[in-house]
Image (cartoon, helix red, strand yellow):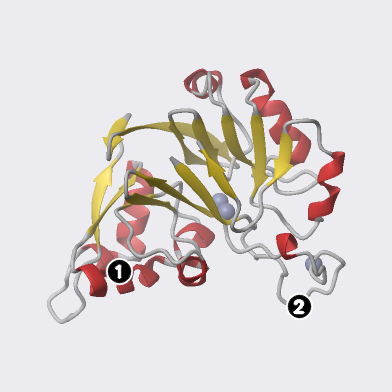
Amino acid sequence: MKITILGSGTSTGVPMVGCSCPVCCSTDPRDRRSRASLLISHAGKNILVDCSTDLRSQMLREAVQQIDAVLFTHAHADHVNGIDDLRGFYFMHKRRIPCHACPATLERLLQGFGYIFHRDDQSTHPPLLDPNAIEGPFELFGLQVIPIPLQHGSGTTCGYRIGPFAYLTDCNGISPASLALLQGVVTVVIDGLRWTSHASHFNIFGAIDAVGPLQAARTILTHLTHEVLHREQQRLPQGVEFAYDGMVIDL
Ligand SMILES: [Zn+2]
Ligand SMILES: [Zn+2]
Ligand SMILES: [Zn+2]
């Protein structure tokens, strides 16, 4: 299984429009962060996690030729607003892509992007996605996918565990039941946002503390803002690192 961090940035992306802070002006390519999403490649199949606002440029950057399934974490704009950019894959392959999301997220997707799922009478646009509501663990291309409920401010996010790997973006709380589902993970990618606190995201040390009991070999912080200079990674404890766009994890 190969994991690619497509986007490691918070909802504004980094640089943020209008900002000239040291991180937004950094020349380190790892400080240029597109909106958070992930690609899981396994057995010739590509699973996309979220349709970030930057989906098109991420697909072009990584030369992705096909998407075989989409998992959604939640329906915030930065995770779904690139959904139209899947259209190119439909034109190339002429097949609808199965997508999976918890029922509440699916409902919001159907409300906001009905045309992606159903053809309405006047439309000539073909539907792009087949919706599947997640009710529990399920199998995808020989991989077991375990949904992990996470607190995200006043809402919830669906994290995902696939074997030794977990992706926990957009969260500021992990219940004991969810932590139990994560026991034994080797690599965890988790929302670390920034150094200072936030009402709906873990900050850097909050994320490190939250997954501490798992004793994962690698903890990778993502959904980072322009408060975070990549080279300050040296301030992190051993085994903890910052995600960057294009980072590859082989498992
Ligand atoms: Zn987000
Ligand atoms: Zn800035
Ligand atoms: Zn969010």
Which percent across, then down, holds residue 161? 45, 32
Q: Is residue 121 above or below residue 80?
A: below
Which percent across, then down, holds residue 123? 18, 80
Q: In this view, does 181 lie above or below 126?
A: above
Checking the image for residue 18, the label placed there is: 2
Which percent across, then down, holds residue 133? 27, 42
Does residue 228 appear in the picture of this structure? no
Checking the image for residue 131, the label placed there is: none
Q: Place residue 211 in its image quadrant.
A: top right
| Amino acid found under the numbered disc labelled 1 | Phe
Residue at mark 1: 89
Which percent across, then down, holds residue 210? 67, 27
Q: Is 162 displayed left or right of 78 in the figure?
A: left
Does residue 128 appear in the picture of this structure? yes
Closer to the chain start, of discs 1 and 2, is 2
Front in this rendered view, residue 50 or 151: 50
Q: Indicate if the residue with disc 2 has its beta carbon within 8 Å of ligand 2.
A: no
The crowd level at tag 2 (other Cα within 10 Å; few <14, some 14-19, many 20+) is few
The crowd level at tag 1 (other Cα within 10 Å; few <14, some 14-19, many 20+) is some
The residue depicted at 76 percent of the width and 48 percent of the height is 194
Q: Is residue 133 above or below residue 109?
A: above
The residue depicted at 62 percent of the width and 58 percent of the height is 245
Front in this rendered view, residue 2 or 138: 2
Q: Nearer the viewer, mark 1 or mark 2?
A: 1
Q: Is mark 2 on a helix, strand or loop?
A: loop
| Amino acid found under the numbered disc labelled 2 | Gly
Give the Cα separation between the discs numbered 1 and 2. Answer: 33 Å
Q: Is mark 1 on a helix, strand or loop?
A: helix
